[in-house]
Image (cartoon, grey):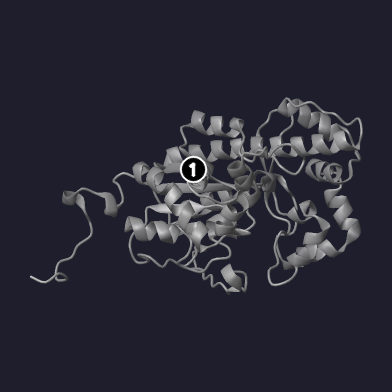
Amino acid sequence: MRDGVDGASTLARYEPSGQRKQVNFPTEPCRIHTYGDSFTQGHQVSDGETWQEVLAAHFCEPIRNFGVGGFGVYQAAMRLLEIEQRGEGAEYLILTVWGDDHFRSIYPWRWLAFPENVLPTLAGEMFHANPWIHAALDFDSGQLIDKPNVCPDEKTLERLSDLDWLEATFASDPVVQLLFARATGAVVDREPFDALGRLLGQPVDLADGDATRTTAQRLLHSYGVRVGMRVLDRLQAFALERGKQLMVVLSYPVGSVWHACSRTPAYNDIDHVDWHPKEFRDHLASLGIPCVDSMPPHVAEFDTFRLSAKDYVDRYYIGHYNPRGNHFFAYALKDPIRDWLSPRPPAYRAEAERLIRFEGYLPG
């Protein structure tokens, strides 16, 4: 696709297993698998320019990339569980959580969440954001519920052209009602708001349009985060049962990095939220899951420059990270991942345990 840096085309190839094509050490045994959305996949950069390949080249060992553009926390986690129970399983698993990935976990059809001006772009070179598997919580027990894809194949996708079927399928969904309230300031049925408020311990203010929009956004995010916590419960239980190690990496949209670098509040209106709130981070800590936050390295590097926050983010973002942004991200993760692995990557092992060999290569 012609979506790369400086207007370049990008090339992304995939293996039969579903992973992105490996450039570094493709024939070597792999102990690190990565999962997540398009920032994991490496959208808008070519094979070899993803952060996994940058890190693999530096570590001198392979890193497999199973990211899928558009996925949320739940969808990426289900992909992890599917692949890790097959023959391609790895010991070290990295789940990257970006921006609104928590929201995506609970959408029955992500299309319904997009602004109207975005919809025409979804039917061009790429078709995506169609209905999918998603997650919910039982409003009484708080237990995680796996929700099926209502359009799992080509034939059932044709239902999306039937307005009566759309209304019958989606209109009563609590998340769709929240999306409608966020967009319009109007409430069709108050009960989902009150039920979610009780479940999440959140106030529900529907006094007027502005209050309704704010409440809907807050409930959507809190609900998505709570679902994400239950998903991580499931992943950690799976990892412990299988003798695997799990790490979560937090990444951010360009606007969040811009706000953080300029020290302006990012969470002062309906369009800016704290994507990775303390509740989620504290839950990871309680589960013993190491978490790497990519924001502090961004801010620390920005503080060494003499440029504006806009000029800084323009170095790294073209929607997704450009090749330079992927390089930054790889080195923001380098030390935590290196210290997490046991033994350390070949590039960092002591001389006696180093795996890199040069027999027959150097003279004499």
Callout 1 amino acid: Ala
Q: Is 347 situated left or right of 262 in this image?
A: left
**Where residue 43 appears, x then y in whole percent?**
58, 63
**Where residue 179 appears, x then y in whole percent?**
81, 45
Count of picture labels: 1
Q: Is residue 319 above or below residue 259?
A: below
Extreme residue toward the front, this view? 306
Q: Is residue 38 above or below residue 263?
A: below
Is 303 or 252 nearer to us in this picture? 303
Q: Quadrant of the N terminus?
A: bottom right
Q: Quadrant of the C terminus?
A: bottom left
What crowding class fits label 1: few (fewer than 14 Cα within 10 Å), some (14-19), or many (20 or more)? few
Asked if residue 240 shows in the view, the reply is yes
Q: Is 41 situated left or right of 202 in this image?
A: left
Residue at 86% x, 47% y is 171
Q: Which residue is mark 1?
A: 300
**Where residue 359 appears, x then y in whole percent?**
14, 67
Q: Is residue 84 above or below residue 219?
A: below
Q: Is residue 104 above or below residue 206?
A: below
**Where residue 127 appears, x then y in whole percent?**
70, 67
Q: Is 281 situated left or right of 266 in this image?
A: left
